[in-house]
Image (tube, rainbow, N blue to C red):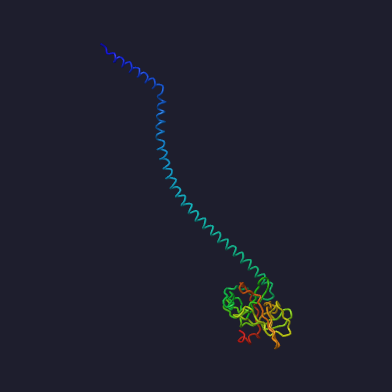
């Protein structure tokens, strides 16, 4: 007798096979696509993380390389900037120096006597500028006892005289030196006297042996008298700041504030005129 369950199983199996083949015929490509999509979806996070890690590492080393390059470029730029600033500063200094030299030469051309322009290379403010050294000497025609003047604030004024000459330098004795004597006179009244330095006691000078009859007032201008054969006549020396007239005697005295400011003295004009022999006769008394 035939088994009914076996017949039923064969029918069910045939039906299932029919359905399976039918579905495979219509949906094989779609199932495959969905499978790939699922696979990609599962693998994407891992792939993304891997790519990001590789990119991060690559960017990190690239940034290190770029940072090193940028530092080098920054150093070069800073060096160029410093060089530019230094060049600009040197250019400004040269420009100022040229303007100063043109001004000095212009002043020199206006002087009524032959001069040599000299630059002050040393001075000693501790002892009221008793030592002033300039960069011109015998090679420039400088001789001992030549008078020295300067231009400050547009005014010509007495500085002193040369007392020592070397081949390429000279030492100037300033008018405020206590061993310095200059023939001077009051510009307004023309009364003359002898100007004597007072340093290191004072930066002022004392005008001695002024006729008692002379009318002297505060602010009177004192100029060179031309006596003594050193300084030309009429060069400004300073102005009167005080007057001393004793109850006896035939002379009076006046304190004079020099026009020259030794603290700002940079250049001088050495008058290259030969001094008269009258001065050398008493040079031991008035060095």
Nearest the viewer among 271 and 12 is 12
Left or right: 130 in relation to 73: right
The answer to whether residue 67 is visible is yes
Quarter where residue 90 is shown: bottom right
Quarter of the image where the C terminus is located: bottom right
Nearest the viewer among 227 and 11 is 11
Quarter where residue 180 is shown: bottom right
Image coordinates for residue 201, horizontal then vertical, percent: 60, 80
Nearest the viewer among 130 and 211 is 211
Residue occupying image coordinates x 50% and y 54%: 74
Residue occupying image coordinates x 63% and y 87%: 282
Give the residue at the far bottom of this rendering. Answer: 249
Residue occupying image coordinates x 43% and y 44%: 56
Residue occupying image coordinates x 62% and y 65%: 96
The answer to whether residue 138 is visible is no
Image coordinates for residue 212, horizontal then vertical, percent: 72, 85
Give the residue at the far left of this rendering. Answer: 1
Quarter where residue 284 is shown: bottom right
Left or right: 243 in relation to 134: right
Image coordinates for residue 270, horizontal then vertical, percent: 63, 76
Give the residue at the far front of this rendering. Answer: 247
Quarter of the image where the N terminus is located: top left
Nearest the viewer among 131 and 238 is 238
């Amino acid at each position: 007798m035939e088994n009914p369950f076996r017949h039923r199983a064969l029918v069910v199996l045939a039906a299932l096979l029919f359905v399976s083949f039918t579905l495979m015929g219509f949906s094989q490509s779609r199932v495959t696509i969905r499978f790939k999509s699922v696979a990609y979806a599962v693998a994407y996070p891992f792939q993304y993380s891997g790519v990001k890690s590789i990119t991060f590492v690559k960017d990190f080393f690239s940034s290190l390389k770029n940072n090193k390059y940028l530092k080098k470029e920054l150093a070069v730029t800073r060096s160029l900037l410093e060089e530019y600033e230094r060049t600009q500063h040197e250019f400004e200094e040269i420009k100022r120096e040229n303007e100063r030299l043109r001004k000095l030469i212009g002043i020199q051309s206006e002087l009524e006597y032959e001069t040599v322009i000299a630059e002050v290379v040393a001075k000693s403010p501790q002892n009221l500028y008793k030592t002033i050294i300039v960069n011109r000497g015998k090679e420039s025609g400088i001789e001992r006892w030549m008078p020295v003047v300067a231009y400050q604030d547009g005014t010509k004024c007495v500085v002193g005289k040369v007392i020592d000459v070397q081949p390429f330098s000279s030492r100037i004795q300033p008018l405020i030196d206590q061993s310095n004597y200059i023939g001077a006179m009051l510009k307004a009244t023309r009364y003359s006297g002898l100007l004597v330095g007072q340093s290191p006691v004072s930066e002022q000078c004392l005008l001695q042996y002024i006729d008692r009859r002379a009318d002297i007032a505060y602010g009177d201008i004192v100029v060179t008298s031309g006596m003594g054969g050193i300084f030309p006549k009429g060069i400004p020396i300073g102005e009167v700041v005080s007057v001393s007239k004793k109850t006896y005697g035939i002379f009076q005295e006046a304190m004079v504030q020099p026009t020259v400011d030794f603290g700002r003295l940079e250049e001088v004009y050495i008058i290259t005129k030969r001094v008269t022999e009258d001065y050398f006769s008493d040079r031991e008394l008035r060095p």
